[in-house]
Amino acid sequence: MDTLLQPDKGLLIWTVVSFLVLVGLLRVFAWGPLLAAVDAREARLREERERAEAARREAESIRGELSARLAGAEGEMREIIAKAGREAEAIRTSAHRTSEEDAKRLMAKARRELEEEKQRLMGELRREVSSLSVLAAERLLRRSVDPGVQKDVLERFFREAEPR
């Protein structure tokens, strides 16, 4: 057991030399490619992060543009709705005005027709009254009146009976 606690100097030198050769070989064949791979991976991650940042900035820009467009579209929508409301009110007013004019025109036409019918009926009534009057006068006189005389009497009666 003593030999374990007291190492041999030659063995110690060969162990250190073997270790240094192993470190050199690992440095040349393992650490170099390993560090190059780590550096390449780090560069790829940096590029991906930069691309992600650029994509985020572009997305923010697009979002801002879309928000502006949406606000513009909302404004246009409100304007279109207001315009449609104004047009509907104008159409309603026009339809109301047209219906009032039609009603007035129909009322005037009905009044004219009533007046014409009244005049016609009054004329018929006058003729009937005069005819009855002549007939009554004939019976009273017991004689027939000549049609020419009857016509003269009727015309004079109408002239005198006309409202002044």
Image (tube, helix red, strand yellow):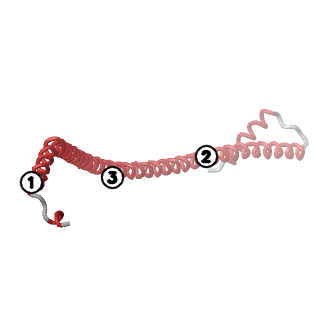
State yes or no: discs 1 and 3 in contact (Cβ < 8 Å). no
- Number of the front mark, 1 or 2: 1
Gap in Å between the C-alphas at discs 1 and 3?
86 Å
Task: Kindly identify the amino acid type of the residue bearing the numbered disc 1.
Answer: Gly
Q: Secondary structure at mark 2?
A: helix
Residue type at the position of mark 3: Ala
User: Answer yes or no: do the residues labelled 2 and 3 have beta carbons within 8 Å?
Assistant: no
Per the image, the residue denoted by label 3 is 71
Please tell me which residue is depicted at 24% across the width and 45% down the height of the picture. 48
Of residues 97 and 90, the one drawn nearer to the viewer in this rendering = 90
Residue for badge 2: 106
Label 1 sits on a secondary structure element that is: helix
Q: Amino acid at mark 2?
A: Leu
Near-viewer residue (112 or 152): 112
User: Residue 86 at what x, y percent from top left?
Assistant: 42, 51
Q: CA distance from mark 1 to mark 2?
A: 136 Å
Q: Nearer the viewer, mark 2 or mark 3?
A: 3
Instruction: Tell which tag, 1 or 3, sits nearer the viewer.
Output: 1
User: Which residue is pictured at 13% across the width and 42% down the height?
Assistant: 28
Q: Earlier in the sequence, mark 2 or mark 3?
A: 3
Circle 1 residue: 10
Q: Residue 82 bears which disc, if any?
A: none
Instruction: Report x, y in % for residue 110.
Output: 64, 46
Q: Position of residue 33 (x, y in %)?
A: 18, 41
> The N terminus is located in which quarter?
bottom left
Q: Residue at x 11, y 58 (%)?
A: 8
Distance between mark 2 and mark 3 Cα atoms: 52 Å
Q: From this viewpoint, is residue 77 visible? A: yes
- Can I make out residue 50 in this image? no
